[in-house]
């Protein structure tokens, strides 16, 4: 992208400065970026991804600058992106960047068609009123009981992760946090119904693969490809991941979105990133031009096809052969209506995320009871939400 930009803009020099990651951990880059900002050595364009809770801190600390005036000045068309990915760039009434990578989170399922057929289970049409969370429960149990014969599992989900918990609670017309980001609501009616749905599948029906019963030396994705899991909780990104593992095409699978909620939406929690301008930049106009270049149709396609990142933020790239898999295409319905995350009012997302593993795992695998475990989990989330703003 630097090469194609400088060919069009020979008077602008672009220097690429990679940031070394600790063991490949992207979160390790942000303290280094903050230190560079304080030292006055941070580059003109960088990424403070909202999915990693970083954009809000960067904006609060005035490390990055809003781009609303530049958008208005150039009459830059935000309609070239899926709207939810633009909504994701907004905070406190300002737009802080343009979309980089993005997808709609774990908003559906992939299922082994041969296993479902052998188990005597049939997925309904996803647009049918017959497609409900109760129906999914019934199918997961049926597949799970069939898979028991070969020590396999009916279902794997992304729970108890934060994003997985969001998808599940939203499937029951609720969420994990209140809309204002001040209250943990896992124990309230809608969310609790969803959590009961999950707990019973894992601990009453015993048809769910989880940390307490899965082999330690194999991933859930590989188990799905191997035919050891019948249904796996995945988003559009999962289609690519499974296809990479399914090299010989022996696995026959299809995708299906979550059943619709009462408001007509499919449950999701958008995942995505952002490109941001350094508030201290002395080359704002030139940086803005480069930013527009890398988020263009060409840029988004390049990020997907060459880097392997999921920059699925523009509708105009979706007719490319890279996206032709029908299992991916099914997810496009959600790209127009994806639900963004709730921002904790005190901006302590990085402290909240680990709680889902620390308190969620014992609950999920049945080491604690449903009521006591869920209350303990919710109480710890609330304790952090009650702390002062960062």
Image (tube, rainbow, N blue to C red):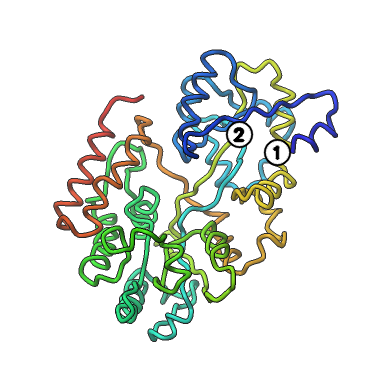
Q: Measuring from the top left, give residue 70's x and y in whole percent.
A: 68, 27
Sequence-first disc among 1 and 2: 2
Which numbered marker is on residue 209?
none
Vertical placement of residue 246 versus 70, above or below:
below
Q: Nearer the viewer, residue 227 or 329?
A: 227
Q: Nearer the viewer, residue 124 or 229?
A: 229
Q: Label 1, on which residue?
A: 294
Instruction: Answer whether residue 68 is visible to the viewer in this image.
Output: no
Q: Secondary structure at mark 1?
A: helix
| Residue at image location 49% in from the left, 19% down from the top | 35
Q: Measuring from the top left, give residue 327's x and y in whole percent.
A: 57, 68
| Residue at image location 68% in from the left, 40% down from the top | 295
Q: Measuring from the top left, give residue 168's x and y in whole percent.
A: 35, 57
Instruction: Answer whether residue 236 is visible to the viewer in this image.
Output: yes
| Residue at image location 34% in from the left, 25% down from the top | 389
Going by the picture, which residue comes out furthest to the front?
A: 217
Q: Label 2, on which residue?
A: 275
Q: Nearer the viewer, residue 330 or 92?
A: 330
């Amino acid at each position: 992208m630097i090469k194609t930009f400088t060919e069009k803009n020979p008077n602008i020099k672009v220097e690429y400065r990679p940031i070394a990651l600790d063991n490949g951990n992207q979160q390790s880059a942000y303290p280094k970026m903050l230190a560079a900002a304080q030292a006055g050595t941070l580059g003109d364009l960088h990424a403070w991804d909202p999915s990693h809770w970083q954009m809000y801190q960067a904006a609060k600390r005035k490390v990055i600058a809003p781009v609303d005036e530049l958008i208005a000045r150039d009459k830059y068309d935000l309609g070239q992106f899926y709207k939810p990915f633009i909504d994701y760039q907004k905070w406190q009434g300002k737009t802080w960047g343009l979309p980089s990578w993005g997808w709609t989170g774990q908003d559906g399922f992939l299922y082994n068609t041969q296993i479902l057929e052998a188990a005597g289970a049939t997925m309904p049409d996803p647009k049918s009123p017959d497609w409900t969370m109760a129906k999914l429960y019934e199918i997961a149990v049926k597949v799970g009981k069939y898979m028991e014969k070969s020590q396999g599992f009916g279902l794997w989900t992304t729970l108890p992760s934060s994003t997985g918990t969001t998808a599940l609670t939203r499937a029951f017309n609720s969420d994990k946090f209140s809309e204002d980001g001040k209250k943990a609501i896992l124990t309230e009616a809608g969310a609790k119904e969803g959590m009961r749905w999950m707990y019973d599948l894992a601990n009453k029906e015993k048809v769910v693969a989880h940390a307490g019963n899965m082999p330690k030396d194999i991933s859930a994705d590989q188990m799905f490809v191997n035919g050891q899991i019948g249904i796996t909780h995945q988003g559009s990104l999962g289609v690519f991941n499974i296809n990479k593992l399914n090299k010989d095409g022996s696995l026959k699978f299809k995708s299906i979105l979550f059943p619709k909620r009462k408001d007509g939406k499919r449950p999701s929690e958008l995942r995505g990133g952002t490109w941001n301008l350094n508030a201290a930049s002395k080359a704002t106009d030139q940086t803005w031009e480069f930013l527009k270049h890398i988020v263009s149709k060409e840029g988004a396609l390049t990020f997907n096809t060459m880097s392997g990142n999921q920059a699925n933020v523009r509708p105009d790239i979706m007719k490319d052969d890279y996206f032709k898999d029908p299992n991916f295409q099914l997810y496009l319905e959600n790209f127009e209506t994806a639900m963004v995350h709730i921002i904790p009012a005190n901006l302590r997302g990085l402290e909240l995320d680990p709680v889902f593993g620390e308190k969620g795992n014992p609950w999920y695998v049945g080491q604690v009871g449903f009521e006591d475990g869920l209350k303990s989990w919710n109480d710890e989330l609330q304790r952090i939400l009650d702390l002062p703003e960062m």
